[in-house]
Image: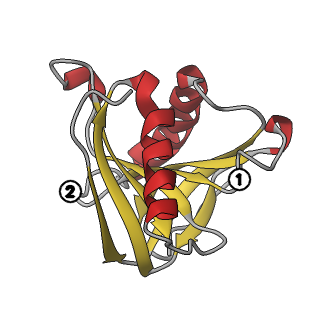
Amino acid sequence: MITTTSMIRMGTLPQRFLACVQNVGPYKGDSALFERLFTKVKDWAGPKGLLESSTTEAISIYHSDSDSVPEEEQTISVGFTVPEGTKVTGDIKLLEIPKGNYLVGSFEILPTEYGDAWNKMMDFIEKEKIKPLNGMMYESYRNDPRTHPEGKHIVDICIAV
């Protein structure tokens, strides 16, 4: 159960580009996996000066519906926003996060509460009879939880509607 208040709102989010790595397979609750993936992109982007902007966001995109796609086939992309046209190499991919209308839930949660936050978003969608678009669902991380006094993650969950 989420221990901190949250806010859910509708809004238009801008187009962004994500330098990222993809992972196919189980990811739920695997913080070590997310750390490895973010580190891989950080090690690539950092020396290029791509993480120095105050507008850079750390984002995880969920390409698969975890309720209908088997765990071993679930795909995520993890990385950082970069300028349009950034040249990528090797395992690093460049994905577009399209501008559009999103349901945005802002949460301050413990690492174990991500599932509860997503459930709260899905319950809101059902209760308000909102029609999500097939496609863009992601988390945008707003802090480094290692610097939070309670180790909490400040995160926006964004679902295209």
Check disc 2 and report its element: helix, strand or loop.
loop
Residues 126 and 142: in front is 126
Label total for image: 2
Q: Which residue lies under the disc numbered 1?
A: 65
Residues 5 and 27: in front is 5
**Residue at horizontal 65%, vertical 47%?**
76
Which circle marks residue 46 in the picture?
A: none
Single out the mark in the foreground, 2 or 1.
Answer: 1
**Residue kind at label 2, given as amino acid type:** Ser
Earlier sequence position, callout 2 versus callout 1: 2
**Residue at horizontal 29%, vertical 43%?**
107
Quick check: marks 2 and 1 in contact, CB under 8 Å? no
Specify whether 74 is left or right of 155: right
Which circle marks residue 54 in the picture?
A: 2
x and y, in percent, of residue 63 in the image: 68, 57
Check disc 1 and report its element: helix, strand or loop.
loop
**Residue at horizontal 25%, vertical 61%?**
55
Where is residue 152, by image quadrant?
top left
**Residue at horizontal 42%, vertical 63%?**
82
**Residue kind at label 1, given as amino acid type:** Asp
